[in-house]
Structures are given as C-alpha cells and as structure tokens.
Image (cartoon, rainbow, N blue to C red):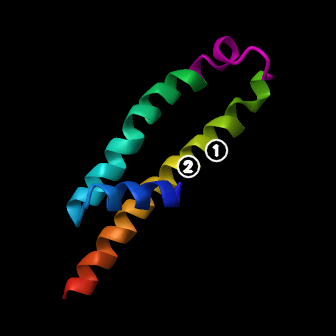
Amino acid sequence: MVFLSLFTFQKFNLSGFEKTAAGILLVLPGMIIDTFAIQFFEAIFPNMPSSRAASFGSWLMWAYTIVILTALISSIQQKQVKH
C-alpha cells in the first residue's frame, strides 16, 4: 500500500496538500463501499463465516490507514525538505 501510494504521488507529480487530498480520495470510495460489505458480510461473502467480519473490517481499515498516513508523512517530509 505504501509503494502504491508513493507511486501514485510521483506519477502525478503531487506535492504538499495534493498528496493528502489524493490519499483521502484513494481510500474514500473503498471505505464507503466496505462499510456496506462489512454490514452485509454474510450476503456478500457467503463462503466465509460471519465470525470473520470483524477481522476482515480490521484489515481493511489498517490498509486504508496506511495509505492516509503515507500521504500525510510524505507531504510533511516534502515541506521540511523545502525549508
């Protein structure tokens, strides 16, 4: 997730707040969709036991957090290098 985020930032030549906004925009659609995926876990993932819904949701939130933190940290580091 870190490398995907950094690759995206570099490919589109993003800087500062653009990285933060891009990180949020990268994860926002997934977070909205996954809210429903977790709520209706048994219907969407019939082959998985419902007891796994919490673990599944935790891994998703962990991945989204990594993307957002990568965006924030790379944005802060870039500001510090410029000063």
**Three-letter amino acid code at disc 2?**
Ala
Mark 1 lies on a secondary structure that is helix
Up the image or down, 77 lies above or below 23; here it is below
Residue 77 position within the rendered picture, expressed as x and y whole percent measured from the top left: 33, 78
Residue 4 position within the rendered picture, expressed as x and y whole percent measured from the top left: 48, 54
Residue 14 located within the stretch drawn in magenta:
no
Q: Which mark is residue 82?
A: none
* Quadrant the C terminus occupies: bottom left
Tell how many labels.
Answer: 2
In percent of the image, x 38 and y 70: which residue is there? 73
Residue 80 position within the rendered picture, expressed as x and y whole percent measured from the top left: 27, 84
Q: Which residue is mark 1?
A: 59
Place residue 68 in its image quadrant.
bottom left
Up the image or down, 29 lies above or below 2; here it is above
Q: Which residue is mark 2?
A: 63
Is there CB contact under 8 Å for labels 1 and 2? Answer: yes
- Is 67 or 62 nearer to us in this picture? 67
In percent of the image, x 63 and y 43: which residue is there? 58
Q: Is residue 53 left or right of residue 4?
A: right
Region rendered in magenta:
39-49
